[in-house]
Amino acid sequence: MYKLITIDLDGTLLNRYGEVTEHTKEIIKKVTEKGILVVIASGRISESVLTIAKEIGANKYYISGNGSVLYDMQNDKILYENYLKKEKVLEIIDLCEKNSIYYNIYTENAVIAKSLNYNVAFYNYENTKKSSDKKTEINIVEDVYNYVKKLNTNKFLKMTICDESKIVFSSIVRRLKNISDIDVLDVSHMSQKKIKTGTKEVSVGYYYTEVSSKNVDKWYAIEEIMKRENIKQEEVMSFGDNNNDILMIKNAGLGIAMGHSNNEVKKVADVITATNDEEGVAKVLEELIL
């Protein structure tokens, strides 16, 4: 019997247009009605995760920033945190600026960037479909280094570094790995998303990595939930599609990889389901829970 289901967002619960289908929402509702705890575990900023958690009725906990934050929604407080320090953010900004590579920074409630490119362009597209209270806040800033330096916070969830050239991207990843007290996510494939502009679809493809504080992972936040809820490892089901989901897929009682996941993710999974565009999450929940 599964008591906790953790679900990644991009590439897993969300389809290529950044949406949770109505059918999937209905399936999740039926799962929660059986008393099973559903928790979103995402790399997104806290405000964005919170919006989708409410949309699907997962109203107890959420995990943001790839495990940087575990949030108790019912008591409105952070239960667990492991932030990227400002000094590291500034060091990475300096490296990216000197090498003319695109980057953005995630705080708990906003994404900071110099322009609307790559993943930020997709968030901006998502915002066009949302009401004002559900939009992801995007702060476009010309001088990001000084903007961040002046911010009255030392709490940063993560940074994302992007480029269309694999050679350029691989070079910057090697340099990032020389910086102490951070973790650099190994992602070897391109991110592929679709943005609708009128009647046309525009493909957004890019290589990317995510940088977080040392020892940040979704699984560590999940373990905190397990302790609080007295849930055993074999009672956890986890869904994901990317390298930042590997540990939670590997350690869950049942780890499920999406059909389009890379081989590194698939080889640690117990089950491989359909893709996010084929409602792979809903298919497994219908078959194994309902």
Image (cartoon, helix red, strand yellow):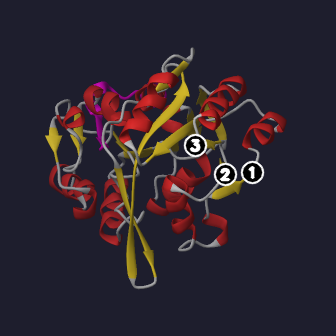
Q: CA distance from mark 3 to mark 2?
A: 8 Å
Asked whether the viewer can see residue 214, the reply is: yes
Q: In the rendered structure, which disc, 1 or 2, sits on the residue that comes first in sequence?
A: 2
Callout 2, which amino acid?
Lys
Name the residue that disc number 3 marks: 103
Callout 1, which amino acid?
Glu
Magenta stretch containing residue 236, yes or no? Answer: yes
Q: Are marks 3 and 2 in contact (CB under 8 Å)?
A: no
Q: In the rendered structure, which disc, 3 or 1, sits on the residue that comes first in sequence?
A: 3
Judge by depth and name the residue closer to the eye, 226 or 146: 146
The magenta region covers 225-241
Residue ID at (38%, 34%): 244
Residue ID at (57%, 43%): 103
Judge by depth and name the residue closer to the eye, 115 or 276: 115
Magenta stretch containing residue 174, yes or no? Answer: no
Q: Quadrant of residue 140?
A: bottom right
The percent position of residue 84, horizontal first and vertical second, equals 62, 27
The percent position of residue 43, horizontal first and vertical second, equals 48, 42
Res. 142 mark: 1
Res. 114 mark: 2
Res. 35 mark: none
Q: CA distance from mark 3 to mark 1?
A: 13 Å
Callout 3, which amino acid?
Tyr
The percent position of residue 148, horizontal first and vertical second, equals 76, 38
Q: Residues within 10 Å of mark 1 (few under 14, many from 20)?
A: few
Q: Are marks 1 and 2 in contact (CB under 8 Å)?
A: yes
* Residue 79 located left or right of residue 140: left
* Residue 238 located left or right of residue 10: left
Residue 45 vs 66, above or below: the answer is below
Judge by depth and name the residue closer to the eye, 39 or 68: 68
